[in-house]
Image: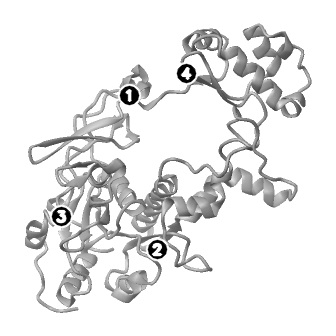
Amino acid sequence: MADTPDADHRTAGSLTADDPHEGSDGPMPATTPQPLEGILVLDFSQFLAGPVAALRLADLGARVIKIERPGTGDIGRTLAFAGREIDGDTVSFHAMNRNKQSITADLKDPDDLAYVKQLVARADVIVQNFRPGVMERIGLDYASVAEINPTIVYASATGYGNEGPWRDRPGQDLLAQSISGLPWLSGSKSDGPVPVGLSIADHLLSCHIAQGVTALLVRRFRTGQGGHVESSLLEAMLDLQFELLSTRLNDDSIAVERHGVHSAHAFLAAPYGTYPTSDGYLALAMNPIPRLGELLGVDALVVMTDPREAWEKQEQIEAILAATFATDTTAHWLSILDAADVWCAPVLTLDELLASDGFAAIDMTQEVQRGGTSIRTTRSPLRVDGQVLRSAKSAPTLGEDDAAVRAEFPPAGVRA
């Protein structure tokens, strides 16, 4: 087994003693060891998939040390979501790098590289998201690292994998969405491509990488064997489309045919979609058309008893529903549909979401402090043993932990 950090090297902190989630087995002790406590992670990655994968490990209790280039650090420090910054770093950097430490190292400098290799020998996990070939040139690829630390768990996140004509293309979320065909699944038949308006490829890839790391750690604890987990933005996008791709691979007549302006899915019939009300929008999932007609008092829908009509008259049905819902408020229609257990929901704006009782109830935010600045971020979406995972540690300033880490792991003075 590789040397793992002793008690002094572990992340300080434990599960917060919040009220247990409803339906759990009861209150947990005020402090419960986190699942990955004692695991040391070196995070070589930059905005976005790699850092968020490392964040997921940190939120599970791992100690994460970011290895950043001197002077500039992670490009995420300056690549601002909505152009917003707090205390000299972007808000998005704060969100994805809380609960970590930061040291600086120029990996092209022999002395810095030699020191980093000393840390590699002590680490349990490495996360990196450079383009294929970069870590090989530095000498920190999996094969090289495994010679230093045979039980290392090594995670590589790329744009499009290590092989094929796209391997050297820029690994960026919109570009990966576009290559995967995803933007042709949203919108109506009159629209051009409609990408998802968040970094969905990056975030899903971060989940896959974190899952792979934890799986390899389980194997290592069981067998003593390290390993290398790899995935890419493209693979995350293809996995997201497993229903479509699996169906198409078995039936070549399947094609993407988007429907009318209210449809929310190219492969689901009416009434699946979103509809304007007098003061907002309402979403309807899979529901029998005649039953909707009865509840809404629309005879033209009541008589559509043939299930094929949900496909064959899709746009006609959607137009009838849209005209009906536009006559009253979202709350009015919800009062009718919710009472009948119809699958529906309001389509909330960002402001409505943040002001809602449902958002307050799920308690998805936390507050961290950096210096004299208070920063609100989201928390881990996980609960473990009924406990919400939270950490009060903010994202580090660049090189904030240089002195402390070098004092804890003093340089050997021997160039690698």
Residue type, numbered disc 2: His
**Which residue is labeled 3 in the image?**
398
Residue type, numbered disc 1: Leu
Q: Give how far across and how far down residue 331 sits, in percent.
A: 55, 12
**Which residue is labeled 4 in the image?**
280
Q: Tell which circle, 1 or 3, labels the residue nearer the N-terminal end.
A: 1
Q: Give how far across and how far down residue 402 sits, in percent.
A: 12, 69
Q: Nearer the viewer, mark 3 or mark 2?
A: 3
Q: Tell which circle, 3 or 2, labels the residue nearer the N-terminal end.
A: 2
Q: Give how far across and how far down residue 411 sits, in percent.
A: 12, 81
Residue type, numbered disc 3: Leu
- The CA span between labels 4 and 2 is 48 Å
Mark 4 surroundings: few (<14), some (14-19) or many (≥20) residues within 10 A: some
Q: Give how far across and how far down residue 230 sits, in percent.
A: 50, 70
Q: Quadrant of the C terminus?
A: bottom left
Q: Tell which circle, 4 or 3, labels the residue nearer the N-terminal end.
A: 4
Above or below, 363 relative to 153 = above
Residue type, numbered disc 4: Gly
> Left or right: where does residue 187 sit relative to residue 369?
right
CB atoms of marks 3 and 2 within 8 Å: no
**Which residue is labeled 1 in the image?**
354
